[in-house]
Structure formats: C-alpha cells, structure tokens
Image: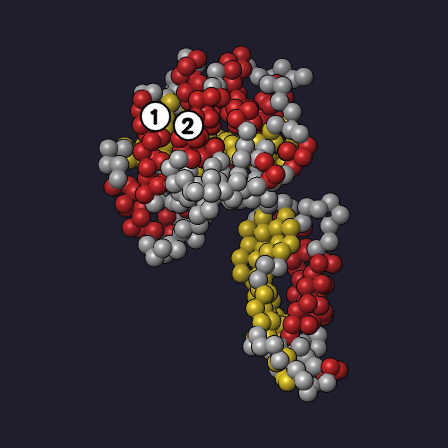
C-alpha cells in the first residue's frame, strides 16, 4: 500500500463525520421533497433559494465566509495562511424535476463536510479551501445546463444564458435576479478568477462501482458527444395499391439506416454510446406509405479520435442504407471530451488506496460542472457507488458508508492538492 498521504491529509480524512454529513443530506432532501421519495429542487426556484439559505446558515454558524457571484454560484471559504488562489471543492444543488436526493447535493455537502472536518481538527492550509455550489447544472428548468460553471470558467459568457426561457416561462435573468435579491446580506464577488484546482465528488450515476464492489472511482475523463438528425425522404402513396417493388418507403429506409448505424457503432469494449431516441414520421397515417422519417443520433465516447472517425462515416452509411430513399444528415451540436490531468486522477486514486478504500479509474458517461472547470484550472472528480446505477430518479440512493468514504477521500485529496504544485 502507498504511504503517499501527508499526516495532515490523513488527519483531515479521519475528522470527517459521516453522521453529520448524512443528517445534512437528509435535511437538504426535505427541501423540495416529492411524495415518491425524490426531490424537485430545480435551479433558481424557491426550493433552490431555501437550500442556499440553509447552507449559508450552517456555514455562518461555523464562522465561515459565504459569498456569491453574478451567476449565483455560491462559495463558502475557509481561509488559508497565505493569499493564494483557492482549492475549490463542490458540485451543484439543483435537481431534475423528478430527481433524487444525492445527484449534485452530495458533492456540495461532502465539500462542506471537508471544511467542517478541517475546522474540527484545527488543520490549517497554506491556500484557502472553498466549497462551491454551481448554478443550474441540470438544465431541467432552464435548458442551458452548467450555466454557473460555464460562465465561471469562461467557457461562455453569462450574458449568453440570460435570455433563456425556463420550462415554466420564467426568463433566467429574472430568476437569477430573484435568487440574488433573496440574500442581500451575502457578500458579492467577481465571476471567475481561477483556482489552484477543483475537485468534485458525485454519485456515479451508473452501475460499475456497485457491480465491482468498489468504494471509489477516480474519474479519468468526461465523454464528448456528437448530436444530429437524419431525415429520410421517400415517396408517399396508397398502402393498398402501390406495389412493394416500386416503393420508396421512408420508414423502411430509416430502419435500414439505423441498422447500418448499429453496425458502424459496434464496439466489443462497450465504450461507445449510441442512441436513436426520437423518430418522427410523416404523414404518420397507417394507410399511407411514409413520405418522411426523421430520427435523432446521440453518439458519445471518451476519446475525440473515436468520435471524429466514426462520426465522419455516418452520412455515407446512412445514404447507402436508405437508398432508394434520400437521406440527409443535419449536424446539431458537438462537445469534445474533457480529460482530467493525470496528477489529479492519481492523487484521488492514491488517497483512496491510502485510506484503505478499494478504487478504480472510470470515465464519466454523464456531464458534470468539472468538464467546464477543467478548462480553467486542473480539475478532477471522484465517484461513489449508487444503488443499481439509478440517477435522475426518485429512487436514487447512496449508502451512508459510501457517502462518508467519498468525503474522506475528498478531504485527503484536497489537503494533498492544496499543498501540491500542479501546473
Ligand atoms: Zn449532478
């Protein structure tokens, strides 16, 4: 076993109080609690503001400084001995409309637990350690997920998001103003400013850790994606009178195209993610040969080279398979994978091993704020197991033991990285 952790890092991990963390998780789960056991605490709603107020109260009770920026990203600061860029730890507090009790909020409360553990143990750091809760990660209400982390990191200016209209008709600009106005006593800080490093703890939202019986994953990367639509055009006609041989049936063309894509996307390692989630048929009448079929493509992979190479072959594959129908590919959006720096991944893995927690490396299938923060400073993530891989679901669950273990690794990693040179 490695003996890489400093004594301070081990002391920080040992000071983590799992019962306190669990009670805070359950207190937050009560804000926006759903009858089915889940949580609805969407970004910049009354429930989000209530959760922010509760967290602010806990921070102030510990004498920790609370501040907020123009994107309503919320920070709790434990000062360091020197005036250096902070080590950031955190995640998001907003949930999906039918969300669970752990997605996002776990990483925020684990980070807050680290600050409390350091307070309890009287452990000082050279640089400040800050907890952060990023605004609107989920994008369930305002369809511009990761608003807070994107605007903090410079990925996109905050102005780009202000006119976005929420599912409830509210404009993001107004919801943001309402949230900031709800806590006028919280110190305002500039948006951005960088950090020494950022570490985010999160439930895995997938089945791997549970299946492998492991406590921790050091996340290596966040996969990128390509999204597009294919339109297959045929010739409409009477279902009863048009001979089969003469048909250009758009649905049959689309089925052949999807079968060809399944072949193109085949991957024995099961790393490729390929989904046709949407099919529209026109005129959508049972006794008319379809004139048009339009389907979506959602293609994800952790390696840019694989995304590039397979995506480049989609259009030709679809055209050939759909013939004699016509087929057109309409590119919609793409995102490059985020690869976390090796020293950060190694630090998380080493901290877990040193604390006696079985760990593995794992790419993230889902997006996280860390993807964008990684473009501004060295960033990394750790996952804890969640029951049956369920997330964005009222039954989402992580055990108190796993929650505590993740917070211990976060504490040790934060202490190690706070003193390390990373660039
Ligand atoms: Zn999340």
Q: Secondary structure at mark 1?
A: helix
Q: Which mark is residue 24?
A: 2
Measuring 62% from the left and 59% from the top, which residue is drawn there? 276
Residue 127 showing in the rendered view:
no
Name the outermost residue toward the front.
35
Q: Are marks 1 and 2 in contact (CB under 8 Å)?
A: yes
Measuring 71% from the left and 63% from the top, which residue is drawn there? 259
Q: Nearer the viewer, residue 115 or 303?
A: 115
Measuring 63% from the left and 84% from the top, which residue is drawn there? 237
Residue hosting label 1: 58
> How far from the left and from the top, in percent, is residue 26?
43, 30
Front of the two marks 1 and 2: 2
Q: Secondary structure at mark 2?
A: helix
Q: Choose the circle earlier in sequence order: 1 or 2.
A: 2
Measuring 44% from the left and 50% from the top, which residue is drawn there? 140
Q: Nearer the viewer, residue 297 or 389?
A: 389
Pointer 2 local density, CA inside 10 Å: few below 14, some 14–19, many at least 20: many
Pointer 1 local density, CA inside 10 Å: few below 14, some 14–19, many at least 20: some
């Amino acid at each position: 076993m490695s003996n890489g952790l400093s004594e301070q890092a081990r002391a920080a991990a040992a000071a983590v109080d799992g019962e306190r963390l669990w009670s805070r998780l359950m207190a937050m789960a009560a804000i926006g609690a759903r009858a089915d056991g889940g949580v609805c605490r969407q970004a910049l709603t009354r429930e989000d503001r209530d959760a922010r107020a509760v967290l602010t109260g806990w921070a102030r009770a510990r004498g920790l400084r609370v501040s907020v920026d123009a994107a309503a990203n919320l920070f709790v600061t434990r000062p360091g001995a020197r005036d250096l860029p902070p080590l950031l730890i955190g995640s998001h507090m907003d949930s999906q409309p039918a969300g669970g009790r752990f997605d996002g909020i776990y990483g925020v409360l684990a980070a807050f637990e680290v600050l409390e553990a350091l307070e309890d143990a009287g452990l000082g750091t050279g640089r400040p350690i800050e907890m952060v809760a990023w605004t609107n990660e989920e994008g369930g209400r305002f369809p511009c997920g990761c608003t807070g982390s994107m605007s903090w990191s410079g990925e996109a200016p905050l102005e780009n998001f202000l006119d976005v209209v929420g599912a409830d008709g509210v404009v993001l600009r107004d919801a943001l103003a309402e949230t900031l106005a709800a806590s006028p006593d919280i110190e305002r800080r500039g948006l951005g400013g960088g950090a020494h490093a950022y570490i985010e703890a999160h439930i895995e939202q997938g089945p791997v850790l549970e299946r492998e019986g492991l406590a921790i994953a050091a996340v290596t990367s966040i996969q990128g994606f390509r999204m597009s639509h294919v339109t297959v055009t045929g010739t409409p006609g009477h279902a009863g009178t048009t001979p089969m041989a003469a048909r250009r049936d758009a649905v049959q063309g689309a089925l052949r195209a999807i079968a060809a894509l399944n072949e193109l996307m085949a991957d024995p390692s099961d790393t490729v993610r390929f989904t046709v989630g949407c099919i529209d048929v026109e005129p959508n009448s049972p006794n008319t040969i379809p004139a048009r079929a339009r389907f979506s493509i959602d293609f994800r992979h952790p390696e840019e080279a694989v995304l590039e190479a397979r995506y480049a072959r989609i259009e030709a594959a679809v055209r050939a398979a759909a013939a004699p129908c016509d087929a057109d590919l309409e590119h919609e959006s793409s995102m490059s994978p985020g690869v976390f720096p090796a020293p950060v991944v190694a630090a998380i893995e080493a901290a877990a091993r040193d604390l006696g927690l079985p760990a593995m490396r794992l790419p993230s299938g889902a997006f996280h704020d860390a993807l964008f923060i990684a473009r501004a400073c060295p960033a990394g993530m750790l996952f804890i197991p969640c029951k049956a891989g369920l997330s964005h679901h009222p039954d989402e669950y992580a055990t108190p033991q796993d929650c505590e273990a993740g917070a211990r690794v976060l504490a040790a990693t934060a202490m190690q990285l706070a003193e390390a040179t990373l660039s």
